[in-house]
Amino acid sequence: MAKRLNNQSTVGDVLKQIIQVNKLQPGMDQIDVKDAWKNLMGNGVNYYTKNVVLKGSTLYVELSSAVLREELSHGKTKIITMINEELHRDVVKDVVLR
């Protein structure tokens, strides 16, 4: 049963409560990670990005360029750090480039 919020709750607090009660956080993380990838990687990488999917704490990125995939594979830890900093919490623990 959902707890009743007082009349002085902010809209942000109400939305956080709704997300928590309805267990919507994994879906919200999926959207947030896609947006973070798009913002952080820029137009050059986004042009070759086919798909970005978060499953659990692993980020799967499908790229159409083998050269770019090889380049990004050298900076996986930096990608993880950048995305987690953008989201202000640890969501991504591993990156798989396909």
Image (cartoon, grey):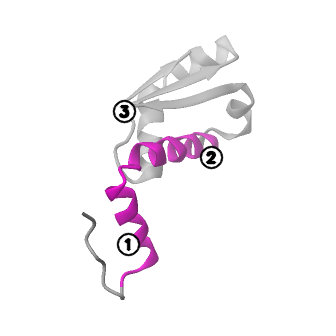
Amino acid on which disc 2 is placed: Asn
Residue at 57% x, 30% y is: 52
Dot 1 or dot 2, earlier in sequence: 1
Determine whether label 1 and label 2 are within 8 Å by CB: no
Q: Which residue is mark 2?
A: 39
Amino acid on which disc 3 is placed: Ser
What secondary structure is marked by label 3? loop
Q: CA distance from mark 2 to mark 3?
A: 20 Å
Q: Which residue is mark 3?
A: 57
Q: Which residue is mark 1?
A: 13
Q: Is residue 1 left or right of residue 83?
A: left
What secondary structure is marked by label 2? helix
Residue 7 among magenta residues = no
Give the magenta-colored segment's residue range: 9-38
Q: Estimate how packed mark 3 is, as few (under 14), some (14 to 19) or many (20 or more) residues with alpha carbons within 10 Å.
A: some
Dot 2 or dot 3, earlier in sequence: 2
Q: CA distance from mark 1 to mark 2?
A: 26 Å
Amino acid on which disc 1 is placed: Asp
Residue at 43% x, 35% y is: 80
Q: Estimate how packed mark 1 is, as few (under 14), some (14 to 19) or many (20 or more) residues with alpha carbons within 10 Å.
A: few
Residue 17 among magenta residues = yes
Q: Estimate how packed mark 2 is, as few (under 14), some (14 to 19) or many (20 or more) residues with alpha carbons within 10 Å.
A: few
The quarter holding residue 14 reads bottom left
Residue at 62% x, 38% y is: 41
Dot 1 or dot 3, earlier in sequence: 1
Determine whether label 2 and label 3 are within 8 Å by CB: no
- Please provide percent x and percent y for residue 47: 75, 30
What secondary structure is marked by label 1? helix
Query: Closer to us: mark 1 or mark 2?
Result: 1
